[in-house]
Amino acid sequence: MSQLTHPMESILRMNRMPHIWCPGCGIGTAMTALAEALNKTQIPLDKVAVVSGIGCTGRVAGYVKLDSFHTTHGRAIPFATGLKLANPELKVVVFSGDGDLVAIGGNHFIHAARRNMDIAVFCVNNFTYGMTGGQLAPTTPPPATSTTTPYGAYEQPFNLAHLADSAGASYVARWTVLHIRRLTKSMTEALQKKGFSFVEIICPCPTLYGRRNRIGDGLQEMQFYRDNCIIQHGADTRTIDIKFRDKIVIGKFVDRERPTFLDALNSRLLEALGNRYEPYGKVTENADRN
Ligand code: SF4
C-alpha cells in the first residue's frame, strides 16, 4: 500500500504537526499559500529564508522546512534586513501578524518600505493580538471590542495597504484567506518582485476577535468575505480603509519599479568613487530549483 504524503511535504516540517492553531483559524491557509507560492517560483529552497516575529502567525517560521528564524516581538523586519544585506543572494521572506509588524514593529515596517529593502513581507491581519489574548491592535476597526477595549475600539486603525504604499513599497496587495488562488498568485508575484513587496492577508481569528465580536466561527467569517469583498485592482490605497463589518476592497494595488536599497547605495558610491568602488551584492538571477 502506498504511503500517503502531504502535497507540501517538501516545504513543511511534518514532524512539527499538528500545528497550534485553533479550529477555523486562517493562518494555516495563509501558510499553505506561501508554500504553494514558493513551489510556483521554483526559487531554490536553500536560497530562501523565512523570518517571523511573535504571535500566532509567528509560529509559521517553525513549521517551514527552510532556513527560518522566529525572532523577538516586532523585530522580524530588521532581522530580515540584516540577513538580506549580509547575503544578498537570499530571498528573504517576512511572515508575521499585524500586531507584530505594524505595532511594535511599525517603525521598522515604514523604514524598510521607504528604503525599498528587497524583501517580501506577508502580513496576516486578523485585527487583533491572538496569542497574547485578544488585545486591541493597530488594525482593529472601531467599534470592534477587544480585551483592552471592552466597550469598543475608538482609535483610528492603520490602513496597511496605504501605509506600505505611501512609505514607498514596490508591490502592495490585499487578499483574504478565502481567495486562496489569487492570494497564492499575488504571493508568487511578491516573491519575484525586486524591492519591498507587501501582501496583506485578511484572516479570521474565531477564538478571540470572532467570538468577542459575535462574528461566529471561521466558516461564517469566510462567508462574510465571500459576500463583502470587492476586487478592485489598482485602487487608490487612500480609499480602502477597512471598516468594521463592512465591504473590504481587495486586489493588487501597487506594482512599480524603484531602486532597491542596494541599488541606491551602489549607484551613489559609484558616482562618488568611480572605479575605486566595486558594487556590493550583485545578485545573479535565481537558478532553477532543479
Ligand atoms: Fe488563530 Fe486566533 Fe487561535 Fe491565534 S487565537 S490560533 S489567531 S484563531
Image: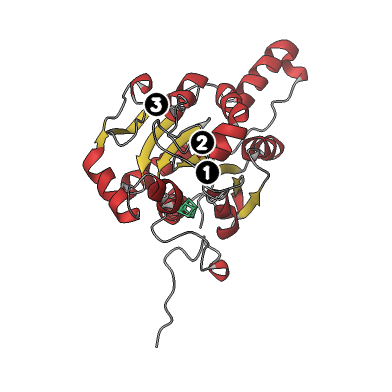
Secondary structure under tag 3 reads strand
Residue tagged by mark 1?
A: 129
- Badges 1 and 2: C-beta atoms under 8 Å apart? yes
Q: Residues within 10 Å of mark 2 (few under 14, many from 20)?
A: many
Q: Is residue 204 visible?
A: no
Secondary structure under tag 2 reads loop
Q: State which tag comes first along the sequence, 2 or 3.
A: 2
Q: Nearer the viewer, residue 20 or 40?
A: 20
Furthest toward the left, the residue is 227
Residue 254 is marked as: 3
Position in image of residue 95 (x %, y %): 54, 45
Q: Residue at x 70, y 29 (%)?
A: 280
Between the C-alphas of marks 1 and 2, the distance is 6 Å
Q: State which tag comes first along the sequence, 1 or 3.
A: 1
Q: Is residue 166 visible?
A: yes
Q: Nearer the viewer, residue 5 or 225?
A: 225
Please, what is the three-letter code of the amino acid marked with disc 1? Answer: Tyr
Q: Residue at x 43, y 28 (%)?
A: 161
Q: Residue at x 33, y 47 (%)?
A: 215
Between circles 1 and 3, the one closer to the viewer is 1
Q: Could you say which quadrant of the image residue 183 lies in? A: top left
Between the C-alphas of marks 2 and 3, the distance is 25 Å
Mark 3 C-beta to ligand 1 under 8 Å: no
Please, what is the three-letter code of the amino acid marked with disc 2? Answer: Ala
Furthest toward the front, the residue is 151
Secondary structure under tag 1 reads loop
Between the C-alphas of marks 1 and 3, the distance is 27 Å
Question: Above or below — where is 17 with respect to 270?
Answer: below
Position of residue 133 in the picture relative to residue 84 (left or right): left
